[in-house]
Amino acid sequence: MIYLNQKPQIGVVIALFFVAVASRFYGIWEWDLVNDEYFTATRAYERYASIINPAYYSLVVLTYKLFGDAEWLSRIPAFILAVFSIPVLYFSWSRNIGRNAALFASGILIVSAWHLWFSQYARFYIGVLLFSSLAYFFFFRAIYVEKLSNLIWAMVFSVLAVSFHVTAIFVPVSVAVAYFAIFLFLKNDEYVNLRNIKIYLVLCLIAGVLITPVLYMVLDRWVSTRQTWGYGAILIIPQLVKYIQVPIVITALFGWLVLLRKDRVAATFFIIILVVPALFLIGSASFMAISPSYAFYILPVVVLLAGIACEEVRKHMAATHSFVVSAVTFFLLIATLLPGFASHFLDRTSFNFDSVVRFVDDNFQENDRVLSFKPGFAFPDGRAIDAVPFISFERDNTVDWYKELQPLLEAENRTWIIVSSKRKPVASGLERWLFCNAKLVWQKYAVRLDYEVNGYQVYLVSDKTKNSQETSMCTQGS
């Protein structure tokens, strides 16, 4: 049995807490809002009263009421939740997987680029992660400890996770699948508490009947938006592995093999709560736009398995080596994660969307228009901008870009087009249209140590560029 019931050291918890505070708060007030942060910052008062995903918006509204309405303050709830998620992971799971394994897991979480990013990102993801981690903890304890309170707390934290984002419903759903598998194949294990498992499975049947109509409504509304920014069923799992980071995933795989050898019940529980969300991503990505970030709640599980692997190596080397030397797997893993961790800050300090705004502002003429694929483009002085209505995401290949952008060529005024630069290229139709009808007038890329690409390009459509290219590439449909 993996349950060890070791008390965590309060000094370690405090040290982890302050490391988390320092790394998560640095520069949080300085970075420009990106992507969906703009909607959180500007529409929190509108969305916090909704019955769907209200939790983070409610925290943002509370923050605004306490500290003012500066847009960067919308990140404060994410920062606070992220800071506490690290010692909470250690404090809780050290009682299940052991003090050192939980310590290693918490250290890995601190340098996780994905966790760091959402720690300073004004969206709901960190709230989902924190409460999902606690839900998983109590669900796991409910297998081994007969107290019904473990099950009750697991469901409470599951509801809290869902209140941040509805996709967290796959936390209790995946646990139900894991419990069912344990009931079918491992119920004779001497440590398994069948009473809690049976109670939860019955509750899931009842809850499934009650909430399925609500979930169907949410899914129907989601699909009806016809958004096309997803990665697709084939690429979404590789993208998820990339977000979690390959070294963590590989180490976690070895951690799971350790569990499989020592405790089949724990190994079954962990693998199923990872596989079910992965299947959800694959299945839903085949007919709707969905991001790997919607499975962000599995990050603590993967990190815990990585911590178990690090501890297993340490135990085998402890007899002949000091703690620092025997923890070689942990330190090697941290070393591989540092480029991504450092790149977060290098990116933020070397590049800012304000640079794009300033360039357009300096060269803007009366009656010019702006088509910005980044939401929230606004001049510093607050003057009105003639903005082209949103068309789609710049990497959407389902759009007929020639048809959609033709009005820009027929208009007499100039148009500034702002496009993000990433490793994934823009839609081929948009790329051809820009080549034929616009001039690249400004571009800049952030400085990073890893393989990520982040930057912006500014194109200008004017009388001099309209129909200036006479090549076969500029023929519609080529």
Image (spheres, rainbow, N blue to C red):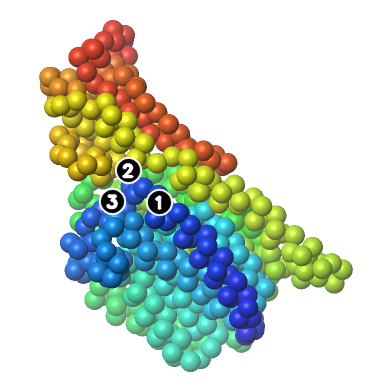
Q: Which mark's residue is nearer the viewer, 3 or 2?
A: 3
Q: Which residue is mark 3?
A: 38
Query: Residues at badges 1 and 2 in contact (C-beta under 8 Å)?
Result: no
Numbered label attached to residue 229 = 2
Q: Residue at x 63, y 75 (%)?
A: 12
Task: Locate the C terminus and report the quarter of the image it occupies.
Answer: top left
> Percent position (x, y) of residue 106?
58, 67
Q: Which residue is mark 1?
A: 30
Q: Amino acid at mark 2?
A: Trp
Query: Residues at badges 3 and 2 in contact (C-beta under 8 Å)?
Result: no
Tell me if residue 67 comes above or below residue 397 in the rendering. Answer: below
Q: Amino acid at mark 1?
A: Glu
Tell me if residue 248 comes above or below residue 210 in the rendering. Answer: above
Task: Locate the N terminus and report the quarter of the image it occupies.
Answer: bottom right
Q: Residue at x 51, y 91 (%)?
A: 146
Which SS class for mark 3?
Answer: helix
Q: CA distance from mark 1 to mark 3?
A: 15 Å
Instruction: Using residue 237 as the reference point, say whether residue 472 is left or right of it.
Output: left
**Residue 213 is drawn in which quadrant?**
bottom left
> Percent position (x, y) of residue 291?
38, 51
